[in-house]
Amino acid sequence: MFKGKFMISNRVYMYCCEDLSLIENYDKAINDNVEIWRCHHRLEIQDNGKIIYTSKQLEEMNLYYNRPASELIFMTLKEHNKLHGKYVPEEVKRKRVNSMRGKSPSAEHRLHLSQALKGRKMSDKEKERHQKHWENQRGKRLSEEIKQKISETHKVIVTDEFRKRISERFKGVPKSEETKKKMSESAKKNMASLEVREQRSVQIKNSKSYQEAMAKRKGEKFWNNGVICVRSIECPEGFVFGKLPFSNEHRENISKVTKGRKFWNNGVINVKVLECPGEGWFPGRTEEYRKKLSESRKGRAPTKGSTGMHWYNNGVDNVLTYECPEGFNSGRLKR
């Protein structure tokens, strides 16, 4: 393949054992500075499109390299592609585009496109076209049919592997305050629905990453050194068993969130909300949950609970304990 006199490929000299000027259309090819020309083997495909030998067969028969000029011909790239069935006229391209318009590609086709475009950067023209498209779509409302199609499409594409790749890609990338606010509002809106909460919970528990994480954590316990809290199977040096106690501020925040909330169940799931979610919900937790809780506590030493404990204060903080700490007085401070 070459374009002009000074772009003759070394492969052309490998094909021909004679002077290149003896090859048909040599003068046209050497003087053309617009079209790209290729050197074609006449034995490979005739003018009528009939295949005589493939390039591999010609190589096996030692008829591919060092051939006389009479067996070769220079052709434009368009003519060469057309001869090999690679050329597609503009009219055919338009018909193909029109026939596919409005149809969504299959999951297999999307996968092939993804693999083909992996690592490829968009040209300036493509970027401009994409920008114009999204500017035209801005402010337009999607129909319920299109929303459903988008939802079904994402159900096929968004796999655990895909989520993992996205997570690794954005790991360590700082988020703007606006993005954080949008994520918070979206999460609150989604978690407001009990059905969504249950679906999300089941989805997380059934995910491969969650099961692997739980398998790694099996047998681990909480330990603290008075400053930090860690999880491990064995006690690290300088640590004691248990979590760090919550600060007063943390306790107040928990109290604000949980104040007035009660457990309700519909026989399948448990929720802790301020009011009854609706018909078919009963106060308390499910029987299945109570049985699991009972089995998990079997064999444990009974705890004292708050029986015999009293409130004490030092003028700033309140503590509930069995004996009066040093510097504390009996009673509880009013908030």
Image: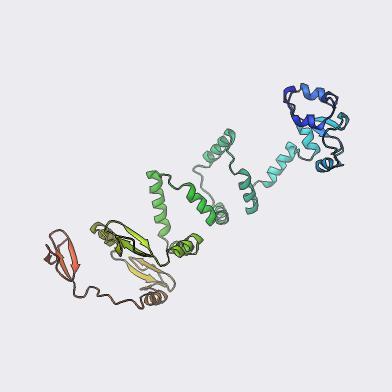
Tell me: residue 145, above or below residue 65: below
Q: Position of residue 99 (x, y in %)?
A: 70, 46
The answer to whether residue 130 is left or right of residue 4 is: left
Q: Position of residue 145 (x, y in %)?
A: 56, 54
Instruction: Identify which residue is drawn at 34% across, 61% down.
Output: 236
Q: Position of residue 229 (x, y in %)?
A: 32, 59
Residue 201 seen anywhere in this rendered image of the structure: no
Instruction: Identify which residue is drawn at 46% across, 47% down.
Output: 170
The answer to whether residue 142 is left or right of residue 62 is: left
Tell me: residue 131, above or below residue 297: above
- Quadrant holding the N terminus: top right
The answer to whether residue 276 is left or right of residue 316 is: right
Quadrant housing residue 326: bottom left
The residue lying toward the viewer, choosing from 157 and 52, is 52
Quadrant housing residue 201: bottom left
The residue lying toward the viewer, choosing from 247 and 271, is 247
- Quadrant holding the C terminus: bottom left
Q: Position of residue 282 (x, y in %)?
A: 38, 74
Residue 125 seen anywhere in this rendered image of the structure: yes
State the colouring used for the structure image: rainbow
Tell me: residue 202, above or below residue 187: below
The answer to whether residue 90 is left or right of residue 238 is: right
Instruction: Identify which residue is drawn at 54% across, 37% down.
Output: 131
Q: How many marks?
A: 0
Q: Residue furthest front?
A: 237
